[in-house]
Image (tube, rainbow, N blue to C red):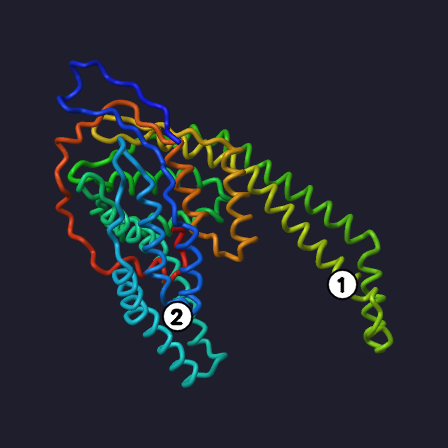
């Protein structure tokens, strides 16, 4: 489907050859075959094929994105992703694992030295999260091509990582109230570093407009905690645990081995726990979708490219339905439909993104940023990947 378009500046201010920008997502056939073949090839190769599988999915999904009627191309390769992963494992994770095994063998598994080393490794890995996200974004942008021009992210991954780690520390300390400000800082950093060809994006704005919505969601979540907690207490005080204890007493005497009630009581308690958890997840997701929609829309307004602005039209309900559909696809296909989840996310963003103004694409030249040949191994090793 096609996004609606777009305001144009006055003719005297528009460069010759400037274009309004129209995004649309056109689904391509064949994703189902890719999903099934990727699943079985991953099984056969003990998941080593996942790097090539990921590349096949990205090429298919990227090809559905059309800008002014012309498709976007993904030029990354499975080999690049595989090499990046091997390099990270060989230079970071394997040495750390060997050091840990050596310390355990020399000092013992309960040694304070080993515990201190494990804490240091945990701290190190947390500091690498932002670095991994930035490098992965850099790789994907550099492999995203339209009209022969590729994207780029030539800034400092280390600087972004420091800000990302700071946001992780401040979140618990401030009970989450630093989130709008830190999310804006991170978005500003990575957006201002982004390029299409040699032309930069820009991002400028304040986090203040986010806090009213954040407060609504924060207190709404507290209320949800209280409601779910009260429901759980009422449920577990309803006699279910008393019945379960009686069943367990029977089991201890080996007198109820064939009693069908045993399984029924146990299943009932497990089902209650699962139901409470799912209720919490559902309420939490619905409440915070109001904030996420506001943040997506506002951050789009803060972004500009070559004089043009952006608008995004997310709603809480659209995010909830996106999430519910994605969860259903993953659960009921045992993960085989993950490529369709990624396609749904891409379509969601493309169909709700609008550009206000015109862009002089003819003046944009190829990026001179150096291409990284080693893929995005760190984000894969840390299991942070979304695409």
Report the label total.
Answer: 2
Q: Which residue is mark 1?
A: 266
95 and 10: which is toward the camera: 10
In the image, 149 versus 180, the foreground residue is 149
Q: Nearer the viewer, residue 376 or 134?
A: 376
Nearer the camera: disc 2 or disc 1: 2
Image position, residue 155 (x, y; %): 22, 47
For residue 180, above or below residue 267: above
The image quarter containing residue 20 is top left
Residue closer to the observer: 23 or 191? 23
* Secondary structure category for the residue under label 2: loop
Q: Are marks 2 and 1 in contact (CB under 8 Å)?
A: no
Q: Give the residue at the far bottom of this rendering.
A: 106
Depicted 314 relative to depicted 136: above or below: above
- Give left or right: position of 141 versus 129: left
For mark 2, what is the residue?
Answer: 45
x, y percent for residue 164: 36, 49
Question: In percent of the image, x 44 and y 42: which residue is there?
Answer: 344
Q: Quadrant of residue 253?
A: bottom right
Residue 223 position within the rendered picture, expressed as x and y whole percent measured from the top left: 64, 38
- N-terminal of the two: label 2 or label 1? 2
Residue 12 point in image, percent of width and height: 16, 14
Could you say whether the residue bearing mark 1 is in a helix, strand or loop?
Answer: helix
């Amino acid at each position: 489907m096609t996004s609606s378009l777009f305001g144009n500046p006055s003719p005297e201010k528009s460069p010759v050859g400037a274009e309004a920008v129209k995004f649309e997502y056109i689904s391509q056939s064949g994703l189902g075959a890719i999903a099934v073949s990727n699943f079985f090839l991953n099984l056969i190769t003990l998941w080593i094929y996942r790097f090539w599988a990921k590349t096949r999915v990205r090429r298919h999904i990227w090809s559905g994105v059309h800008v002014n009627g012309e498709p976007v191309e993904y030029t990354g390769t499975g080999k690049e992703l595989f090499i990046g992963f091997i390099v990270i494992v060989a230079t970071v994770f394997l040495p750390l694992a060997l050091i840990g095994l050596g310390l355990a063998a020399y000092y013992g598994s309960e040694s304070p030295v080993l515990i201190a080393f494990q804490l240091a490794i945990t701290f190190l890995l947390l500091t690498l999260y932002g670095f991994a996200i930035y490098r992965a974004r850099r790789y994907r942008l550099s492999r995203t091509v339209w009209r022969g021009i590729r994207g780029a992210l030539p800034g400092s991954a280390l600087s972004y990582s420091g800000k990302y780690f700071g946001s992780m520390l401040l979140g618990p300390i401030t009970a989450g109230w630093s989130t709008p400000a830190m999310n804006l800082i991170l978005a500003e950093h990575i957006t201002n570093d982004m390029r299409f060809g040699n032309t930069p994006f820009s991002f400028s704005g304040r986090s203040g407009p986010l806090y009213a919505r954040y407060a609504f969601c924060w207190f709404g979540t507290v209320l949800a905690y209280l409601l779910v907690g009260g429901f759980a207490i009422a449920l577990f005080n309803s006699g279910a645990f008393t019945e379960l204890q009686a069943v367990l007493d029977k089991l201890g005497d080996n007198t109820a081995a064939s009693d069908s009630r045993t399984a029924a009581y146990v299943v009932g308690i497990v089902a209650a726990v699962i139901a409470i958890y799912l209720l919490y997840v559902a309420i939490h997701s619905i409440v915070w979708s109001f904030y996420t929609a506001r943040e997506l829309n506002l951050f789009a307004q803060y972004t500009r490219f070559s004089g043009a602005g952006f608008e995004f039209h997310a709603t809480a309900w659209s995010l909830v339905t996106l999430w519910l559909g994605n969860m259903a696809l993953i659960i009921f296909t045992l993960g085989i439909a993950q490529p369709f989840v990624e396609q749904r996310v891409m379509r969601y963003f493309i169909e709700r993104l609008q550009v206000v103004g015109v862009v002089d694409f003819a003046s944009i030249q190829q990026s001179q940023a150096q291409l990284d040949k080693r893929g995005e191994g760190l984000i894969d090793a840390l299991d942070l990947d979304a695409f």
